Image: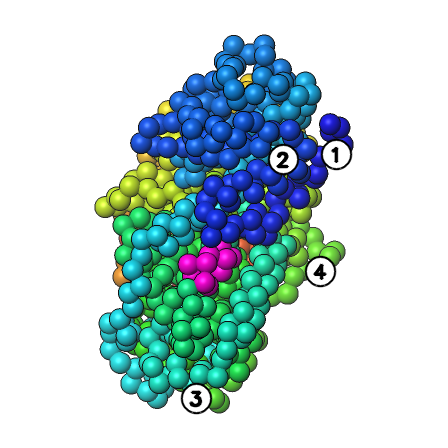
Amino acid sequence: MSHTQKDNVALMCDVAELTGLFDSSQGLDAFLGRIISTVAWHMRAAVCSIFLYDPSARQLVLRANQGLNPDFVNRLRVAIGEGLTGRVLARRGPVCIGNVHSDPDYRVIPGLYEERYTSFLGVPILRKSSPVGVIVLMDPVENYFTTNDVSALQIISSQLAGVIENVRILLSVREGHAARSVPAGPADGGADPGGTYLVQGRGGGHGVVFGLSTRINHYLHASEEEAGRHNGLTEADFDRALAETERQLLDMQRTLRDRLHEAASLIFDAHVLMLKDDAFSGKIRQRIRGGYNPWAATVEAVRAYAKAFADSPLPAFREKVLDVEDLGRRLLNNLSPDEGGDGIDYKGRIIVAEEILPSDLLKFSVEGVTAILLLGGGQTSHVAILARALRIPLVFAGDRRLMRLPEKTPLLVNAQTGEIVVRPDPAACRESLERAAREKELPPPPADASPAALADGTRVRLLANINLQSELAVANRFRAEGIGLYRTEFPFIISNTFPTEEEQFALYIRVLEQVPSGPAVFRTLDIGGDKALSYFPLQHENNPFLGLRALRFTLQNPEIFRTQLRALIRTAAAAEPGRVKVMFPLVASLDEFIAARELALSCVEELRAEGKDCRLPPLGVMFEIPSAVFLADELAAAADFMSIGANDLTQYTLAVDRTNQSMSPWYAPHHPAVLRSLQRIVSAANRAGKPVSFCGNMASNPQMIPFLIGIGLRTLSLDPQRIPVIHDIIAGLTADGAARHARDLLALGRLSEVERYLAENAPPRTV
């Protein structure tokens, strides 16, 4: 077979094709059989096999095969490390061999007919960094599989891990759940008193908006009388609603993929799989034929599935509850669009929910929600950061009356102050919206605007903090001089599984392409604390901010860390020397930095041995812990550059949880201890001759800019939309004046004295 016959990798990544292969009536093995047939066809391989991992026996079991003896399906078992297939799982990485007959691990299994083939390519299927299985390709042509084939199969295996998990969940629930109803009536809390009233929450973003409320699962509590209003529906209406719902889901998946280039694949995969599950749609159809109206039959099925998932002891099952409820709403909306009155489910609505996952936030962004109100325990900064990146106003509120609002209750939401006005006065609402429109962020600077500089000509570089690639256009629009902080965890958070090396490499290359000049500083994975991965649940910790997070987590999980480091090292080789920089978060000791650096160096050696382009980028330390401040001189000597993460540094210095609303009066970045820590870090950088930058909310605060400039900082990284304001503040300062300002502040020992000094010496407003 010719290599040119192989299809493009993009074809193999088509999510709609993979999810469309599932037919629940035939079971998991038939599903896997269709997968291998499709993979073999696209890759033009003579053999394709899928082995699934049996954790009880610690063995791989052949579950689907094309090209070998079919009698071995469900009979052939391979131990970890046994043969070439076992080697794949033992290494947790791809194995590509041009001639298996010369490999010492190759073994002939009589009757399997494997000896007919020469080339071998195997890739592990991993979920939550745990084994799911192995996918194997073979061909009689020697050296048949290329590095492009390896990349393609890695992407496929990453997607298969999530699809296989969803299939297993659906099949398990189908076989084991009882059709129990969700109890009628809303959650606990006081009743909505009616009329106009104010709810005070905590703001999680920007913007003042007006919209109509909706609860995601309100229809689950519908009365029989409400269901009776839909008695005119037929089975044909249900079939039409099924088809329309699937079309909408696939359209939204494509829209999401086009809008967000991160590894956000398979966000709607559970929805599509459930639509095709005969135990779901087929059971609804049976109820319709038994005399139920389609609306009531759909509600009953959704209640049963939601209850079954919610009662499961497994987190992966419980996380599907919102998917089930969301799917039910879409079906009902397509069954009775006139009754729903929405057309598109959530467009223009303000969503009221207990809690949402980052993937839910992405779904809502595609559908044009106006705002989100969260009432549960989801007061996590990563959800707020993601909402800001997606430009979705978000408020955290504890008032349970919001959960009892009638559908389409008018709401006025201020995502900055956290104020929610229920049934606002129309005139006051118009005034608030008009005032908010006048106070929007400054327009971007003109194309010929000069870079930021002090009044005496001293240059200051203003870089952008980036969470998602969609923000890169904003950074360019506001003339950011590069990326001072790219938070690499957000592609992990919004994905359904750990992004592969190839996915991360492609993502980082796109970052460089979209911001073609200036530095690009990538912070390695920072999860734990308030940032969780739904597919990799960490052990329960009484205080997760002091637990396994950031660099501690990646050093404890070297395969995850190695995958990211390899992608970043390859990215550095694709750019001009020194442009790509990598910094490690939450470094607590010199030992941790050295361990991370040693791992990066070993990745360079691996990539060189594999013949891949690579270059070790400059490696930096992010100062976020008091212990690092006391080791600033040693860390400055070891690192290539330094960066100050002031948000966490403030949190850990003052022992204040910055996500806890009740502790907000104690979260003071201008505290004397924080200011002196910042000065100590900058001084250490200057003594070592190492560049130092500043990341944190303080860089967007005009009141604090003179201090930051005064202690010697000349590179600030901030929200790109704040660049025009900070640019103008800087233009009114001189180096000598800012230094005097900083000395005055550093001499003060009381927080009240600092606050009084800042109020009396605030820079002039520019807006």
Q: Is residue 63 left or right of residue 578?
A: left
Rendered location of residue 225, percent (x, y): 35, 85
Mark 3 or 1: in front is 1
Identify the residue under disc 1: 5
Identify the residue under disc 4: 446
- Residue at mark 2 to residue at mark 3: CA–CA distance: 63 Å
Q: Upstream in the sequence, badge 4 or badge 3? A: 3
754 w.r.t. 336: above or below: above
Of residue 616 and residue 729, the one placed in the foreground of this image is: 616
Q: Upstream in the sequence, badge 2 or badge 3? A: 2
Rendered location of residue 327, percent (x, y): 46, 64
**Callout 4, which amino acid?**
Pro
Q: Quadrant of residue 184?
A: bottom left
Question: Quick one: SS at disc 2?
Answer: helix
Q: Is residue 513 left or right of residue 107?
A: right
Mark 2 or 4: in front is 2
Local crowd size for mark 3, using a 10 Å CA cut-off: few (<14), some (14–19), many (≥20): some
Label of residue 425 in the image: 3
